[in-house]
Amino acid sequence: MNNDENKLTKEELEKLRYPVGRFSYAPGENSINNFISNIESFPSKLRHEVENLDEEQLNTKYRPGGWTIKQVVHHAADSHMNAYIRMKLVLTETDPAIRPYFQDRWADLVDSKSDINISLQLIEPLHKRWVMILKNLSDDDIKKRYFHPEQKKFFPVDEFIALYSWHCNHHLAHITSLKKRMNW
């Protein structure tokens, strides 16, 4: 831990890291349509939260040891591109194994420090295509799954959709909670 992290309790650090709580899912706990709605509205919510931030604010970390707002925006694009591809794989193959990636390493690449408008512009049409697929899933599609080799488990489509709904809210909350703490 660095000095800033040492000043915070474990509970405070956990709240900064997971402002909407850690992901959990129990089938049937929420409507898939609600999850899809969260994914659909994410691009406009994200743009709204970052559109008036200056460069210094965009380069502020949402927590000690965390990413900057700029990195969070670029990570959303990276992660959701992967999710979109994973969804297409699960719909066109039988129990495909997905390819994990090192998100922390990706967040350190030069493109994750570039103008956020590049990723904002990418996320909007990406989510339109992704949501088009999600809204047209059949009952059989919902039963499909993919294998995550790092976690050594299968993820069914309904849990996958719930995870990315959470992911949208999780990263939005990183930004909104930082803005609130900083009085921006």
Image: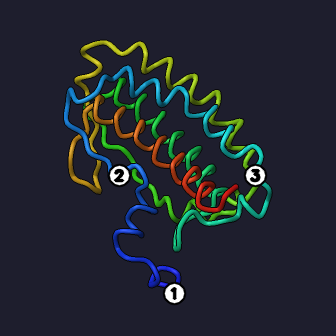
Quadrant occupied by the C terminus: bottom right
Report which residue position mark 2 lands on. 21
Point out residue 61 in the picture as x, y percentages from the top left corner: 61, 66
Point out residue 87 in the picture as x, y percentages from the top left corner: 40, 31
Q: Is residue 156 left or right of residue 58?
A: left
Amino acid on which disc 1 is placed: Asn
- Looking at the rendered structure, the secondary structure element under dot 2 is loop
Report which residue position mark 1 lands on. 3
Taking the view exactly as shown, the residue that stands out farthest to the bottom is 3
Task: Tell me whether circle 2 and circle 3 mark residues in contact (CB < 8 Å).
Answer: no
User: Which quadrant of the view contains residue 166?
Assistant: top left
- Looking at the rendered structure, the secondary structure element under dot 1 is helix
- Gap in angstroms between the C-alphas marked 1 and 3: 27 Å
Amino acid on which disc 2 is placed: Gly
Task: Tell me whether circle 1 and circle 3 mark residues in contact (CB < 8 Å).
Answer: no
Q: How many marks?
A: 3
The crowd level at tag 1 (other Cα within 10 Å; few <14, some 14-19, many 20+) is few
- Gap in angstroms between the C-alphas marked 2 and 1: 24 Å
User: Which quadrant of the view contains residue 117?
Assistant: top right
Given residues 153 and 34, the one toward you in this image is 34
Q: Is residue 150 left or right of residue 111?
A: left
The circle on residue 53 is 3
The crowd level at tag 3 (other Cα within 10 Å; few <14, some 14-19, many 20+) is some
Task: Name the residue at 49% across, 22% down.
Answer: 131
Task: Name the residue at 22% across, 23% down.
Answer: 143
Task: Name the residue at 40% across, 57% down.
Answer: 18
